[in-house]
Image (spheres, rainbow, N blue to C red):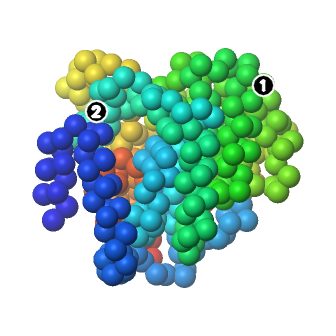
Protein backbone atom coordinates (compact mmCIF):
# COMPACT_ATOMS: atom_id res chain seq x y z
CA UNK A 1 0.00 0.00 0.00
CA UNK A 2 2.66 2.55 1.00
CA UNK A 3 4.63 2.20 -2.28
CA UNK A 4 1.52 3.46 -4.10
CA UNK A 5 1.15 6.37 -1.68
CA UNK A 6 4.88 7.12 -1.92
CA UNK A 7 4.88 7.10 -5.71
CA UNK A 8 1.96 9.54 -5.68
CA UNK A 9 3.67 11.81 -3.16
CA UNK A 10 6.88 11.65 -5.20
CA UNK A 11 5.01 13.39 -8.03
CA UNK A 12 5.04 16.47 -5.79
CA UNK A 13 8.06 18.60 -4.87
CA UNK A 14 9.70 17.06 -1.76
CA UNK A 15 8.73 19.81 0.69
CA UNK A 16 5.15 19.88 -0.60
CA UNK A 17 4.92 16.09 -0.25
CA UNK A 18 6.19 16.39 3.31
CA UNK A 19 3.55 19.00 4.18
CA UNK A 20 0.71 17.04 2.56
CA UNK A 21 1.60 13.75 4.23
CA UNK A 22 2.08 15.30 7.67
CA UNK A 23 -1.20 17.24 7.45
CA UNK A 24 -2.94 13.96 6.69
CA UNK A 25 -1.31 12.21 9.65
CA UNK A 26 -2.06 15.18 11.91
CA UNK A 27 -5.73 14.98 10.94
CA UNK A 28 -5.85 11.26 11.74
CA UNK A 29 -4.05 11.81 15.05
CA UNK A 30 -6.57 14.48 16.06
CA UNK A 31 -9.51 12.03 15.87
CA UNK A 32 -9.35 9.81 18.98
CA UNK A 33 -10.68 6.56 17.51
CA UNK A 34 -8.51 6.91 14.39
CA UNK A 35 -5.49 7.71 16.53
CA UNK A 36 -6.13 4.59 18.60
CA UNK A 37 -6.63 2.45 15.50
CA UNK A 38 -3.38 3.69 13.95
CA UNK A 39 -1.54 3.18 17.22
CA UNK A 40 -2.78 -0.40 17.31
CA UNK A 41 -1.49 -0.89 13.77
CA UNK A 42 1.95 0.63 14.19
CA UNK A 43 3.03 0.58 17.83
CA UNK A 44 5.04 -2.35 19.17
CA UNK A 45 4.56 -3.06 22.86
CA UNK A 46 7.56 -5.09 24.00
CA UNK A 47 9.01 -4.26 27.43
CA UNK A 48 12.29 -5.92 26.42
CA UNK A 49 12.86 -3.10 23.90
CA UNK A 50 12.68 -0.35 26.54
CA UNK A 51 15.95 1.32 27.47
CA UNK A 52 17.15 3.79 30.07
CA UNK A 53 19.76 6.09 28.53
CA UNK A 54 21.28 9.21 30.14
CA UNK A 55 18.69 8.88 32.89
CA UNK A 56 15.67 8.86 30.57
CA UNK A 57 13.30 5.92 30.00
CA UNK A 58 12.81 5.22 26.29
CA UNK A 59 9.89 2.89 25.43
CA UNK A 60 11.93 1.63 22.48
CA UNK A 61 15.28 2.53 20.88
CA UNK A 62 14.01 3.84 17.52
CA UNK A 63 13.63 7.61 17.21
CA UNK A 64 13.10 10.20 14.50
CA UNK A 65 16.07 12.42 13.74
CA UNK A 66 16.09 16.20 13.76
CA UNK A 67 14.94 18.04 10.66
CA UNK A 68 11.71 16.14 10.09
CA UNK A 69 9.56 17.95 12.66
CA UNK A 70 11.54 21.16 12.86
CA UNK A 71 8.86 23.15 14.66
CA UNK A 72 7.40 20.49 16.98
CA UNK A 73 4.14 20.63 15.03
CA UNK A 74 3.52 16.91 14.41
CA UNK A 75 4.38 15.16 17.68
CA UNK A 76 0.97 13.54 18.22
CA UNK A 77 1.10 11.98 14.76
CA UNK A 78 4.66 10.77 15.21
CA UNK A 79 3.91 9.28 18.62
CA UNK A 80 0.94 7.48 17.03
CA UNK A 81 3.37 5.77 14.63
CA UNK A 82 5.36 4.25 17.48
CA UNK A 83 8.55 6.30 17.65
CA UNK A 84 10.34 5.89 20.97
CA UNK A 85 11.56 9.47 20.79
CA UNK A 86 11.51 12.45 18.44
CA UNK A 87 14.18 15.10 18.03
CA UNK A 88 12.72 18.45 17.06
CA UNK A 89 14.57 21.27 15.35
CA UNK A 90 17.12 22.38 14.52
CA UNK A 91 15.90 25.33 16.62
CA UNK A 92 17.56 28.77 16.47
CA UNK A 93 17.01 31.79 18.73
CA UNK A 94 15.35 33.88 16.02
CA UNK A 95 13.01 32.56 13.32
CA UNK A 96 14.69 32.11 9.97
CA UNK A 97 13.47 31.13 6.53
CA UNK A 98 16.41 28.94 5.61
CA UNK A 99 17.92 28.71 2.16
CA UNK A 100 16.11 29.41 -1.09
CA UNK A 101 13.98 26.69 -2.65
CA UNK A 102 14.44 24.17 -4.15
CA UNK A 103 16.54 22.88 -1.27
CA UNK A 104 15.48 19.24 -0.88
CA UNK A 105 16.13 16.67 -3.60
CA UNK A 106 15.34 12.97 -3.98
CA UNK A 107 17.65 10.33 -5.44
CA UNK A 108 15.13 7.46 -5.51
CA UNK A 109 17.20 4.69 -7.11
CA UNK A 110 19.68 4.87 -4.20
CA UNK A 111 17.04 5.77 -1.60
CA UNK A 112 18.85 8.99 -0.78
CA UNK A 113 18.17 12.68 -0.27
CA UNK A 114 20.24 15.82 -0.66
CA UNK A 115 19.17 18.79 1.42
CA UNK A 116 20.38 22.32 1.97
CA UNK A 117 17.49 23.48 4.14
CA UNK A 118 19.50 25.95 6.24
CA UNK A 119 17.87 25.66 9.68
CA UNK A 120 14.46 26.98 8.61
CA UNK A 121 12.37 27.12 11.79
CA UNK A 122 9.91 29.25 13.76
CA UNK A 123 12.46 30.31 16.40
CA UNK A 124 12.86 29.17 19.97
CA UNK A 125 10.09 31.31 21.48
CA UNK A 126 7.33 30.01 19.18
CA UNK A 127 8.52 26.41 19.39
CA UNK A 128 8.76 26.49 23.18
CA UNK A 129 5.23 27.89 23.35
CA UNK A 130 3.95 25.06 21.14
CA UNK A 131 5.70 22.42 23.25
CA UNK A 132 4.42 23.94 26.48
CA UNK A 133 0.82 23.85 25.20
CA UNK A 134 1.20 20.19 24.25
CA UNK A 135 2.82 19.32 27.56
CA UNK A 136 -0.12 20.72 29.52
CA UNK A 137 -2.81 19.14 27.32
CA UNK A 138 -1.45 15.73 26.30
CA UNK A 139 -0.86 12.63 28.40
CA UNK A 140 2.20 11.75 26.40
CA UNK A 141 5.17 9.59 27.29
CA UNK A 142 7.07 10.54 24.14
CA UNK A 143 10.68 11.50 24.79
CA UNK A 144 11.46 14.79 23.03
CA UNK A 145 14.94 15.96 22.15
CA UNK A 146 15.75 19.56 21.31
CA UNK A 147 18.28 19.94 18.50
CA UNK A 148 19.74 23.44 18.76
CA UNK A 149 21.82 25.58 16.42
CA UNK A 150 22.90 29.13 15.73
CA UNK A 151 21.27 31.70 13.49
CA UNK A 152 22.96 32.22 10.14
CA UNK A 153 23.74 35.87 10.98
CA UNK A 154 25.48 35.00 14.27
CA UNK A 155 29.27 35.09 14.08
CA UNK A 156 31.02 31.91 15.20
CA UNK A 157 32.71 33.62 18.14
CA UNK A 158 29.24 34.44 19.49
CA UNK A 159 27.66 31.08 18.64
CA UNK A 160 27.73 29.94 22.26
CA UNK A 161 25.27 32.71 23.09
CA UNK A 162 22.76 31.30 20.57
CA UNK A 163 23.09 27.81 22.03
CA UNK A 164 22.53 29.17 25.53
CA UNK A 165 19.48 31.16 24.40
CA UNK A 166 18.00 28.00 22.90
CA UNK A 167 18.77 26.02 26.04
CA UNK A 168 17.06 28.53 28.32
CA UNK A 169 14.01 28.68 26.03
CA UNK A 170 13.54 24.92 25.75
CA UNK A 171 14.81 23.66 29.10
CA UNK A 172 11.35 23.08 30.57
CA UNK A 173 9.79 21.47 27.49
CA UNK A 174 12.34 18.98 26.12
CA UNK A 175 13.93 15.95 27.74
CA UNK A 176 17.42 16.26 26.27
CA UNK A 177 19.43 18.58 24.04
CA UNK A 178 21.61 18.03 20.98
CA UNK A 179 24.17 20.66 20.01
CA UNK A 180 24.22 20.76 16.21
CA UNK A 181 27.52 22.07 14.90
CA UNK A 182 27.68 19.62 12.01
CA UNK A 183 25.09 20.71 9.46
CA UNK A 184 26.79 21.51 6.15
CA UNK A 185 24.08 24.02 5.22
CA UNK A 186 24.96 26.96 7.48
CA UNK A 187 28.17 28.69 6.33
CA UNK A 188 31.05 28.12 8.73
CA UNK A 189 29.02 26.03 11.18
CA UNK A 190 31.23 22.95 10.91
CA UNK A 191 34.19 25.03 12.10
CA UNK A 192 32.53 24.85 15.53
CA UNK A 193 33.42 21.15 15.64
CA UNK A 194 36.98 22.19 16.48
CA UNK A 195 37.99 21.32 20.02
CA UNK A 196 38.25 24.81 21.53
CA UNK A 197 34.99 26.00 19.97
CA UNK A 198 33.22 22.96 21.39
CA UNK A 199 34.84 23.48 24.78
CA UNK A 200 33.43 27.02 24.90
CA UNK A 201 29.91 25.99 23.86
CA UNK A 202 29.63 23.06 26.27
CA UNK A 203 31.24 24.92 29.17
CA UNK A 204 28.77 27.78 28.82
CA UNK A 205 25.82 25.40 28.46
CA UNK A 206 26.77 23.35 31.50
CA UNK A 207 27.20 26.54 33.53
CA UNK A 208 23.47 27.22 33.13
CA UNK A 209 22.38 23.57 33.23
CA UNK A 210 21.23 23.63 36.85
CA UNK A 211 18.84 20.69 36.43
CA UNK A 212 21.38 18.45 34.68
CA UNK A 213 19.50 18.05 31.42
CA UNK A 214 21.42 15.69 29.12
CA UNK A 215 23.31 17.68 26.47
CA UNK A 216 24.65 15.71 23.50
CA UNK A 217 26.89 16.61 20.57
CA UNK A 218 25.96 15.82 16.96
CA UNK A 219 28.92 15.29 14.67
CA UNK A 220 29.54 15.03 10.93
CA UNK A 221 30.53 11.75 9.29
CA UNK A 222 33.21 13.59 7.31
CA UNK A 223 35.56 14.34 10.21
CA UNK A 224 39.15 13.10 10.00
CA UNK A 225 40.21 10.64 12.68
CA UNK A 226 42.31 13.38 14.31
CA UNK A 227 39.16 15.49 14.76
CA UNK A 228 37.28 12.48 16.13
CA UNK A 229 40.18 11.92 18.54
CA UNK A 230 39.84 15.54 19.70
CA UNK A 231 36.13 15.00 20.39
CA UNK A 232 36.84 11.77 22.26
CA UNK A 233 39.45 13.59 24.36
CA UNK A 234 37.10 16.51 24.98
CA UNK A 235 34.44 14.21 26.45
CA UNK A 236 36.88 13.51 29.28
CA UNK A 237 37.51 17.23 29.88
CA UNK A 238 34.05 18.81 29.52
CA UNK A 239 30.68 17.36 30.51
CA UNK A 240 29.17 15.99 27.30
CA UNK A 241 26.34 13.55 28.00
CA UNK A 242 26.41 11.67 24.73
CA UNK A 243 27.03 11.82 20.99
CA UNK A 244 24.78 11.70 17.94
CA UNK A 245 26.60 10.08 15.05
CA UNK A 246 26.09 11.23 12.46
CA UNK A 247 24.77 14.11 10.41
CA UNK A 248 24.57 14.21 6.61
CA UNK A 249 27.70 13.89 4.47
CA UNK A 250 29.27 16.01 1.75
CA UNK A 251 30.90 12.91 0.25
CA UNK A 252 29.43 12.44 -3.23
CA UNK A 253 31.65 9.41 -3.93
CA UNK A 254 29.02 7.36 -2.07
CA UNK A 255 26.70 7.82 -5.05
CA UNK A 256 26.85 5.79 -8.24
CA UNK A 257 28.36 7.52 -11.32
CA UNK A 258 25.01 8.61 -12.76
CA UNK A 259 23.86 10.11 -9.48
CA UNK A 260 27.25 11.71 -8.90
CA UNK A 261 26.68 13.67 -12.10
CA UNK A 262 23.13 14.49 -11.03
CA UNK A 263 24.44 15.71 -7.67
CA UNK A 264 26.69 18.19 -9.49
CA UNK A 265 23.57 19.71 -11.06
CA UNK A 266 21.73 19.73 -7.71
CA UNK A 267 24.63 21.58 -6.10
CA UNK A 268 25.59 21.86 -2.43
CA UNK A 269 23.84 20.06 0.40
CA UNK A 270 24.07 17.15 2.80
CA UNK A 271 23.57 13.62 1.51
CA UNK A 272 21.52 11.17 3.58
CA UNK A 273 19.97 7.75 3.10
CA UNK A 274 21.23 4.31 2.14
CA UNK A 275 24.57 5.46 0.68
CA UNK A 276 25.55 6.77 4.13
CA UNK A 277 25.08 3.48 6.00
CA UNK A 278 28.61 2.05 5.83
CA UNK A 279 30.38 5.39 6.28
CA UNK A 280 28.29 6.26 9.33
CA UNK A 281 28.88 2.77 10.76
CA UNK A 282 32.63 3.27 10.46
CA UNK A 283 32.47 6.57 12.35
CA UNK A 284 30.25 4.99 15.01
CA UNK A 285 32.66 2.08 15.49
CA UNK A 286 35.62 4.46 15.80
CA UNK A 287 33.86 6.58 18.40
CA UNK A 288 32.79 3.55 20.41
CA UNK A 289 36.32 2.18 20.32
CA UNK A 290 37.53 5.45 21.86
CA UNK A 291 34.69 6.04 24.33
CA UNK A 292 33.32 2.58 25.10
CA UNK A 293 30.38 2.53 27.48
CA UNK A 294 31.36 5.82 29.15
CA UNK A 295 28.97 7.82 26.94
CA UNK A 296 25.82 6.76 25.09
CA UNK A 297 25.73 7.20 21.33
CA UNK A 298 22.60 7.81 19.25
CA UNK A 299 23.33 6.43 15.79
CA UNK A 300 21.81 7.60 12.53
CA UNK A 301 22.64 7.27 8.88
CA UNK A 302 21.19 4.86 6.34
CA UNK A 303 18.78 2.94 8.58
CA UNK A 304 16.03 1.34 6.49
CA UNK A 305 15.53 -2.16 7.87
CA UNK A 306 16.04 -4.16 11.08
CA UNK A 307 19.52 -5.34 10.05
CA UNK A 308 20.67 -1.71 9.65
CA UNK A 309 19.51 -0.80 13.15
CA UNK A 310 20.91 -4.01 14.62
CA UNK A 311 24.33 -3.31 13.07
CA UNK A 312 24.46 0.10 14.73
CA UNK A 313 23.35 -1.22 18.11
CA UNK A 314 25.93 -4.00 17.91
CA UNK A 315 28.59 -1.43 16.97
CA UNK A 316 27.99 0.41 20.23
CA UNK A 317 24.93 2.62 19.78
CA UNK A 318 22.43 2.89 22.62
CA UNK A 319 19.64 4.28 20.43
CA UNK A 320 19.05 4.77 16.70
CA UNK A 321 17.32 7.40 14.58
CA UNK A 322 15.68 7.18 11.18
CA UNK A 323 14.89 10.03 8.80
CA UNK A 324 15.39 9.34 5.11
CA UNK A 325 14.30 5.75 5.70
CA UNK A 326 10.97 7.07 6.98
CA UNK A 327 10.44 8.89 3.68
CA UNK A 328 11.18 5.85 1.53
CA UNK A 329 9.83 3.02 3.71
CA UNK A 330 6.81 4.79 5.16
CA UNK A 331 5.09 4.77 8.55
CA UNK A 332 5.65 1.04 9.13
CA UNK A 333 9.43 1.48 9.36
CA UNK A 334 9.43 1.74 13.17
CA UNK A 335 7.22 -1.33 13.58
CA UNK A 336 9.32 -3.34 11.12
CA UNK A 337 12.59 -2.44 12.84
CA UNK A 338 11.25 -3.12 16.33
CA UNK A 339 9.79 -6.47 15.32
CA UNK A 340 13.15 -7.36 13.81
CA UNK A 341 14.98 -6.35 16.98
CA UNK A 342 12.57 -8.42 19.07
CA UNK A 343 13.49 -11.66 17.31
Locate residue 317 relative to residue 343 in the image: left or right. right
Measured from the top left, where is residue 319 in percent x and y? 56, 59
Which of 299 and 149 lies nearest the eye of the viewer?
Answer: 149
Q: Considering only vertical position in the picture, is 342 above or below 90?
A: below
Locate residue 58 relative to residue 258 in the image: left or right. right
Locate residue 31 relative to residue 146 in the image: left or right. left
Q: Which residue is mark 1?
A: 196
Q: Please tell me how crowded label 1 is: few (under 14), some (14-19), or many (20+) other residues with Cα within 10 Å.
A: few
Measured from the top left, where is residue 122 in percent x and y? 51, 39
Q: Are marks 2 and 1 in contact (CB under 8 Å)?
A: no
Q: Considering only vertical position in the picture, is 76 above or below 237?
A: below
Locate residue 189 relative to residue 67 in the image: left or right. right
Measured from the top left, where is residue 154 in percent x and y? 64, 21
Q: Considering only vertical position in the picture, is 41 above or below 21?
A: below
Measured from the top left, where is residue 5 in percent x and y? 17, 57
| Residue 177 at least partly seen | yes
Residue, x 52% and y 24% (percent of image)? 186
Q: Secondary structure at mark 2?
A: strand
Which of 232 and 28 lies nearest the eye of the viewer?
Answer: 28
Q: Quadrant of residue 276?
A: top left
Q: Which mark is residue 125?
A: none
Q: Nearer the viewer, mark 2 or mark 1?
A: 2
Which of 43 and 257 lies nearest the eye of the viewer?
Answer: 43
Q: Considering only vertical position in the picture, is 152 above or below 149?
A: above
Residue, x 29% and y 27% (percent of image)? 102
| Residue 295 at least partly seen | no
Which of 159 and 216 lies nearest the eye of the viewer?
Answer: 159
Give the position of the C terminus as an image quadrant: bottom left
Q: Which residue is mark 2?
A: 105
Q: Sequence order check: which comes first, mark 2 or mark 1?
A: 2
Amino acid sequence: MYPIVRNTLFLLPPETAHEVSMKGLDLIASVPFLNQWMSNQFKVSDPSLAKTVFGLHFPNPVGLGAGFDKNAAHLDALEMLGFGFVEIGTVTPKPQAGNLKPRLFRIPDQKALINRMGFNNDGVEAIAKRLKARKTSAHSKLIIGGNIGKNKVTENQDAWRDYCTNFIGLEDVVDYFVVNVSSPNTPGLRELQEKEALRKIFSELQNINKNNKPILLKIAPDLETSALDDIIALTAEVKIDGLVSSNTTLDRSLLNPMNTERAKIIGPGGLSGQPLLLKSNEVLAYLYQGIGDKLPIIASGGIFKPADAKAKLEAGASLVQVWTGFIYEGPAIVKNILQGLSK
